[in-house]
Amino acid sequence: MDEIELTGTGKRTSRVGLGCGPLDAGVSMRDSTKLVEAAIELGIRHFDVAPPYGLGLAEKVLGEVLSSRWDSFTIATKVGIGRPGRPHALAIARKIMRPLAKVMPRLRRMMRLAVHSTNARRRFRFTAAEVQLSFTDSRRFLRTDCVDILMLHEPRPEDVTPELIHMFERLVTQGEVKLVGSGTGDTFEKLVKFGKVSQYRWDPMTQVTRRSDEQHIQHGALRYGLAALPSAMKARPKQTQELSALLGCDLTDPANLPAMLATMALATDQRSILLVSSNDISRLRSCVRGINWSVARGEQPGIERALQRLLCAPIAAFAN
């Protein structure tokens, strides 16, 4: 696993981070612990979490598993996205329903909508009081006095007030946070910038520029790429063959796609962190172990241009 310095902190972390949405405590605590430990065995040192992840319990999982060794890892959490009520009851319900959801796509969509509606019942107000309450809860669950990154989740321009800026400056000065930033589930151009950290969805068709003192974190390479690439490869076999040759792997084999998507995302920005997420340990291992680090370090030129030639133009899975 390659590492980078978390910009401006002097602390090193892995170029691949674990998105902690799948982590549940309670009835799923054993499985969640195994997933975190598997990530550590793979060399992952960065963990990305938020109050509602794991139905409100993902931060608790990380706190229980990693609290005695936080110095060896980096943690990012967020404010601006609420923790659902009765998380343990929701975790039990999801544990029961998950096997059915695997074979019933409609049920899976209904479960996602139920969680999203729970989180979106009210608009988060980025006041000092509300931010402080959310961050205090996160630190209590994580069992730490300091987090490496604290991000605003999906802020609007008007949310970034002088009061909010002053509060985050105070958190950094007091040593409660090392870096602050903002995150979005969308692509970079939709992000409302704040602080030195930018977290956004990887888009191979977007050229992202940044300052040397900024830290970028990308996500969604697997989720959106696995939906986008098969149709593009079917339509453009010559470009698929070209990209396969550069990667040293057959992209037409579905088993190779997750690792190669991760490789391509890492290669397009050698200073960023890429988040991957799965509740299936074997899939996580296959993806991370299959990364071509020579390509990911930029030692194989032409990857980004070859990928853009394959896609030709933004297609639905990346653009929406």
Image (spheres, rainbow, N blue to C red):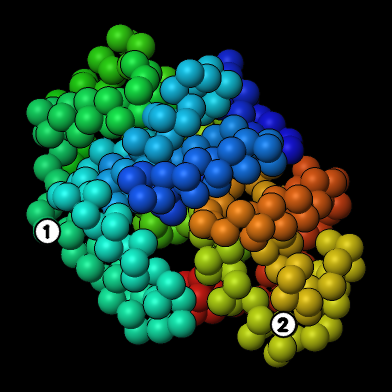
Whether residue 51 is visible: yes
Work out which quarter of the rendered image holds the C terminus and state it: bottom left
Seen at 22% across and 68% down, the residue is 114
Q: Which disc, if any, is residue 233?
A: 2
Disc 2/disc 1 C-alpha distance (Å) = 40 Å
Q: Amino acid at mark 2?
A: Met
Whether residue 192 is visible: no
| Extreme-bottom residue of the structure | 235
Q: Secondary structure at mark 2?
A: helix
Seen at 72% across and 76% down, the residue is 254
Q: Which disc, if any, is residue 104?
A: none
Residue 126 at x, y = what percent? 16, 38
Using the image as rendered, state which of residue 215 and residue 135 is in the foreground.
Answer: 135
Label 1, on which residue?
121
Residue 89 at x, y = what percent? 21, 54
Q: Badge 2: few (under 14), some or many (20 or more) residues near its Cα, within 10 Å?
A: some
Seen at 35% across and 23% down, the residue is 143
From the image, state whether disc 2 or disc 1 is nearer to you: 1
